[in-house]
Amino acid sequence: MREETDVINIIDDTTPFSVKEAYRLLRANIQFLSPHDGCKVICVTSSVAHEGKSSVSYNLSSVIADGSSKVLLLDADLRASHLQLSLGSKGKEGLSDILAGLASSEDYKSLIKKDENHPNLDILVAGKVPPNPSELLSSERMVTLLDELKKEYDYIIIDGTPLCLVSDMLVLSPYIDGYVIVVRAEMTNKKILNKSVSMIKKINGKVLGFVLSRKKQKKSERYYYGEYGSSKYL
């Protein structure tokens, strides 16, 4: 049985206004902090599991895509992909199959799927769970794949693995323009969060900022947006 935290929360017409605005603000901040030309590669990660990084990855990708940029959501959580599970793509070929040379098609583009709700958003799911995720992500095939993808997209949003559990996202640091760390309200431990930041800085990575997820909105905070409900969906 899946936990609630295993299913990503996708923003739609029923999502509170304040939540939508929070994602638009996040988009604006990322665009401001990543001013260089060419494709921008952003990794959304967390310290531990179940903090909401996959929800943030998908919704951030869709909001950026709605702004006319061409976006690829790259599911790089090869160990326990909540994104793949939520999108109904469990067991389908994806990133791991490409990196292991096991994809049924030699053309990786055939495994990239259009998001039906956002025309400018493409998604490459994680694929089958491999025995050696870190080795695949640090391979020459991964570097080559990223180089090819950067020619096609304005943004690549990577749904990464939790930093304090595995080192998968650290090996990709040379190819990542910045990390966004998701922090879950009333759950994330401050010491563990500091450890995550320290790990990124030690490899000369750039922390773009933090996203607070599943924060219950106070009545006083609702005044500014009207009665649009809780922002727990972020």
Image (cartoon, grey):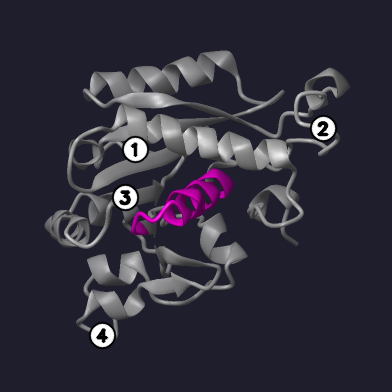
- For label 3, count other residues whose C-alpha is less than 10 Å away and answer few (under 14), some (14-19) or many (20+): many
In primary-sequence order, the first of circles 1 and 3 is: 3
Mark 4 vs mark 3, foreground winner is 3
Per the image, the residue denoted by label 3 is 155
Per the image, the residue denoted by label 2 is 226
Mark 1 vs mark 2, foreground winner is 2
Q: Dot 3: what SS? A: strand
Per the image, the residue denoted by label 1 is 167
Horizontal and vertical percent for residue 2? Answer: 72, 59
3D distance between C-alphas at marks 4 and 1: 29 Å
Per the image, the residue denoted by label 4 is 105
Please tell me whether the stretch drawn in magenta is mainly helix, strand or loop.
Answer: helix
Q: Dot 2: what SS? A: loop
Asked whether disc 2 touches disc 3, contact meaning CB atoms under 8 Å apart, the reply is no
Residue 153 located left or right of residue 65 = left
The quadrant the N terminus occupies is bottom right
Q: Is residue 58 magenta?
A: yes
Observer-nearest of 96 and 31: 31
